[in-house]
Amino acid sequence: MDQTNYSVVVAEKVVVKWLTPPVPLPHPTPEILSHLVEAGFNDTAPPYAALTGPVDGRECLLALATGYLPEARDGWEWCVDEAEAGETAFAADLGRLAADLHLALSTLPHTTTPEPAPPVQAEPPSPAAVRAAGALAEALELTGGEDGRWLAGRADRLRHELEPLDAPIASPLIRIHGDLHVGQILRWRDGYAVIDFDGNPTVTDADPFQPAARDVAQLTTSLEHVAQVAIKRRGTPPERAAAWAAQARAGLLAAYRARLAARGRPDLLDEGLIRPFEIEQECRELIYAARHLPRWRYAPMGVLRTWYTEENPS
């Protein structure tokens, strides 16, 4: 994984994450970590301190200190091992973890002051639809070669998959993680922990309060990416990797739904939004590959080719 920050382990007790460069305040992470503690969500590295200071005349977040989690490995390691072995029992744990996180974040107040309602006019496109359409257009523009031609040939199908975002979003808008993939989930000596609440570094205009389905979609697509990594780096047969991803995805979603239902909040997930958000996420993966990490393109393209084969054109 490429990191945008620099972390130092101190005496195997504390991890100090230095933000490079420092980020002007307000920064979302201290508030979120504080709220998670208050909400009783403990499946993260224990937050200890935030270091702030002036940089070029602005008060900035310089570093975060959190507890050290012994034997921790991120999902780009442990989850690829699971894919190679064909094991999917972990998926239920991830589903419950994501649901517990969203249940805790759903109680964080939305402090943004709503703008005055504009005069009644024709219904404009929803911000989610505009954002997703823009991601698809940019992915089509930036993806070249045979991959680009393949993608262009399926552009209409992809646009059709995004159509549910044209309707007003009815599910609650909560403070989401914003960059929830398996690389943000550590498996350590005592279980699992979700980390890194900085938001998506490649998306600068996203409202932090969104449907929970966006986080869920990024997490499910990351399982698909794990399968592609297992194919490329571990020699896992493509058919077996695809079957593993489908089973892991189903297990994660079943556990997520069950946890929300058990806590009386099934309304947090609008399942009709998962696929369009998954499509948008794959477009964003292609954009990230084109702009920052070209060798990564194989993963989102592999996922899309798995989803849209000649035998499965829908």
Image: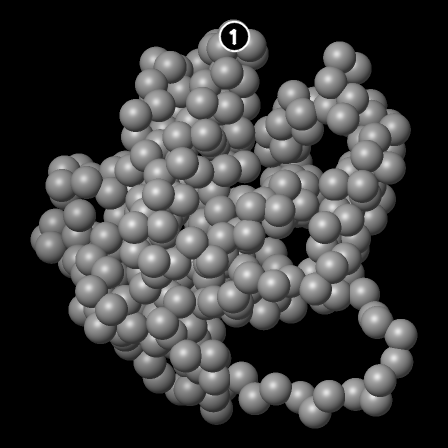
Q: Which x, y percent locates residue 187?
A: 25, 38
State the residue position of label 1: 237
Q: Amino acid at mark 1?
A: Pro
- Quadrant of the rendering where the C terminus is positioned: top right
Residue at x 62% of width, y 49% of height: 273
Residue at x 42% of width, y 86% of height: 59
- Quadrant of the rendering where the N terminus is positioned: top left
Whether residue 254 appears in this view of the structure is yes
Secondary structure beneath disc 1? loop
Residue at x 53% of width, y 67% of height: 173
Q: Which x, y percent locates residue 129?
A: 75, 58
Residue at x 82% of width, y 25% of height: 150
Residue 191 location, quadrant: top left
The vertical placement of 140 against 51, above or below, is: above
Q: Which x, y percent locates residue 252?
A: 40, 36
Whether residue 148 appears in this view of the structure is no
How many callouts does the rendering have?
1
Q: Which x, y percent locates residue 52?
A: 33, 80
Residue 83 location, quadrant: top left
Residue count near mark 1 (Cα–Cα under 10 Å), binned few <14, some 14–19, many ≥20: some
Q: Nearer the viewer, residue 65 or 196?
A: 196
